[in-house]
Amino acid sequence: MAAMVPETLTDSALSTLAHVHTAIWAAAEPAVAEPTPDPSATVPDAEEITTTVEEAVSSGNWWLHTFLPAAVRVALIVVVMMLLRWMLIRLKNRTVRKMIDARRKKMDGKWADNTEALIEAERDIQRADTLGKLMQNVITITTVTIMVLLVLTEMGFNLGPLIAGAGIAGVALAFGAQSLVADFFSGIFMMLEDQFGVGDVVDFGDAVGTVEHVSLRVTQVRGLDGTLWFVRNGEVLRVGNMSQDWSRTLIDVGIAYGADIRKAREIMNRVGLELFEDEEFAKRILEAPEVWGVQQLGNDGVVLRMVAKTRPGEQWATSRELQERIKYAFDAEGIEIPFPQRTLWLKQRDGQTLPDSPQQDPA
């Protein structure tokens, strides 16, 4: 074999032929399958896992190199998020306080003689207070949610499936908790549109009273009898705000048919002007009360209507004071306030002769 090799072949060519020969013989040999590992030999049983965990926990290295760094990171996350929440709430409080103080300075300064500007400034103060309380709830929910997610990430939880599951749960909640979603959206629009705020006297239908607290889901209303109503924002179909910008008191006063209507109107106008000039009520009434005229011709008398434009929420006190003064003035001038009266007509019956003239029966 060696004699048949030409002399022109160099040492490198011979080396190449040798490698090719070795590769051919290796490919011709049957492949030997590697043995399949025994699952029982690779997967540890429960006792081995328990033993390993006990050894890791009892070992000082695990506490020093594994548990302690993780605990420090979790504690740091909690402290930072609580500090961030405190800073945001403090910033919110400072901003709201500056807005309120600026409005109050204007109320005490150049707006002191402008009643409409004073009412608008008071309304801005109420709205700033309401939005401040709402913003504090939003800050708390946001910071706590972020803190929980960061802690779970630090503990080794995979948030990908968790967020995907939360999305599926959100879709399910959208169908199963539609009223809850409606409450939140209704609360947001109520705040943005300034329909009412803390301190306003509102009428929600069954719940009538003063608003004490407003949140995204529930509004708390204190009734006149002291009842605290919890009204879901999604169930509010109409809102009657009786203390926004200004209010008006309506007084219907009845006089007898035999009384002089013009004289009664003059007396009522005089009483209203006296109340408007009274120092105690000067800041409550925006305009001098006026008598609109005859409101109704009732069964027992003539009804005269009187109105007075007042500051927000002062209409009830003004109405009580006006009616009391009108009563004393009518008594002094001899104007009769009517009471229910009925006329009985007696006819002849069963051969008896009865009086045919009508008789008055005050009832």
Image: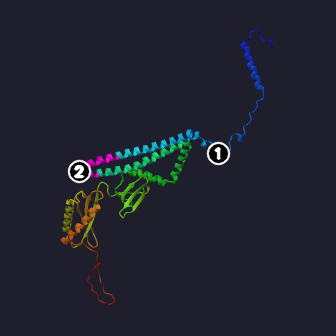
Q: Secondary structure at mark 1?
A: helix
Quadrant location, the N terminus: top right
Which kind of residue does numbered mark 1 sit on?
Answer: Thr
Three-letter residue code for mark 2: Ala
Which label sits on residue 112?
2
At horizontal 39% and vertical 46% (from top left) the residue drawn is 89
Q: Which residues are magenta?
A: 95-120
Read off the residue under disc 1: 50
In this view of the protein, can residue 105 be seen by the observer?
Answer: yes
Q: Does 205 sit left or right of 105 as displayed? A: right
Find residue 113 and report its horizontal and vertical position in percent: 22, 51
Residue 154 magenta-highlighted: no
Q: What whole-number distance in Å separates the C-alpha atoms at marks 2 and 1? A: 79 Å
Within 10 Å of disc 2 (Cα), the crowding (few <14, some 14-19, many 20+) is few
Label count reads 2
> For mark 1, does the 10 Å Cα neighbourhood hold few (<14), some (14 to 19), or many (20 or more) residues?
few
Query: Residue 30 sits in which quadrant?
Result: top right
Q: From the top left corner, tell me how far across and down residue 115 is, in percent.
A: 24, 53
Given residues 138 and 186, the one toward you in this image is 138
Q: Name which residue lies at 39% across and 63% down.
A: 227
Q: Is residue 160 above or below residue 264?
A: above
**At 42% from the left edge and 45% from the top edge, which residue is drawn?**
85
Check the picture and name the quadrant holding the C terminus.
bottom left
Q: Which marked residue is nearer to the observer: mark 2 or mark 1? A: 1
Which of the 4 image quadrants contains residue 322? bottom left
**Magenta: predominant secondary structure element?**
helix
Q: Is residue 116 magenta-colored?
A: yes
Secondary structure found at label 2: loop
Rendered image: mark on residue 117: none
Residue 272 percent coordinates (x, y): 21, 62
Q: Earlier in the sequence, mark 2 or mark 1?
A: 1
